[in-house]
Image: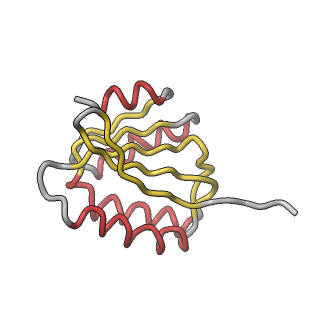
């Protein structure tokens, strides 16, 4: 029997003296994935007002979204888009690079796509 894993994991990491939020996306995301992770993201960001948060999104295992999950992702970007200073998206597919450019329209902070994790982390550590 084959297992199809999918979902989002959330964490907080520290690099030198800077903390940043991490998200790891796996598989094809569903609406149910967002019903679980959205309250966690809301809670993690509720207490952080200043300075704005940096985030690393690891999309290397992301296969895409179901239609309703894509809408959930869009709503999440609109809700929290002003709370981020920098968002580094680490991926390995051309459509992820395109999605990064489109998604940056709804985020007030800087959003960059990276093919290499080291480059993404270097960019976040200002």
Horizontal side of 58 relative to 18 (left or right) equals right
Percent coordinates x, y for residue 53 in the rendering: 23, 49
Q: Is residue 6 above or below residue 87?
A: below
Q: Quadrant of residue 60?
A: top right
Which quarter of the rendering shows the C terminus? top left
Percent coordinates x, y for residue 76 in the rendering: 36, 63
Horizontal side of 38 relative to 106 (left or right) equals right
Q: Is residue 107 above or below residue 41?
A: above
Q: Quadrant of residue 112?
A: top left
Q: Residue furthest left?
A: 50
- Picture residue at 30% right of the left edge, 63% below the top: 44
Percent coordinates x, y for residue 39 in the rendering: 37, 72
Q: Is residue 14 above or below residue 44?
A: above
- Picture residue at 14% right of the left edge, 58% below the top: 49
Q: Is residue 100 above or below residue 114?
A: below
Percent coordinates x, y for residue 30 in the rendering: 58, 67
Which quarter of the rendering shows the N terminus? bottom right
Count of numbered badges drawn on the protein: 0
């Amino acid at each position: 029997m084959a297992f199809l894993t999918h979902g989002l994991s959330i964490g907080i990491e520290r690099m030198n003296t800077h903390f940043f939020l991490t998200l790891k996306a796996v598989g094809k995301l569903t609406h149910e994935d967002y019903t679980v992770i959205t309250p966690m993201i809301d809670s993690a960001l509720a207490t952080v007002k200043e300075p704005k948060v940096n985030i690393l999104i690891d999309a290397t295992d992301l296969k895409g979204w179901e239609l309703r999950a894509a809408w959930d992702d869009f709503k999440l970007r609109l809700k929290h888009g002003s709370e981020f200073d920098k968002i580094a998206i680490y991926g390995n597919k051309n459509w992820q690079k395109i999605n990064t450019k489109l998604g940056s329209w709804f985020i007030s902070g800087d959003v960059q796509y990276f093919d290499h994790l080291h480059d993404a982390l270097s960019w976040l550590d200002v």
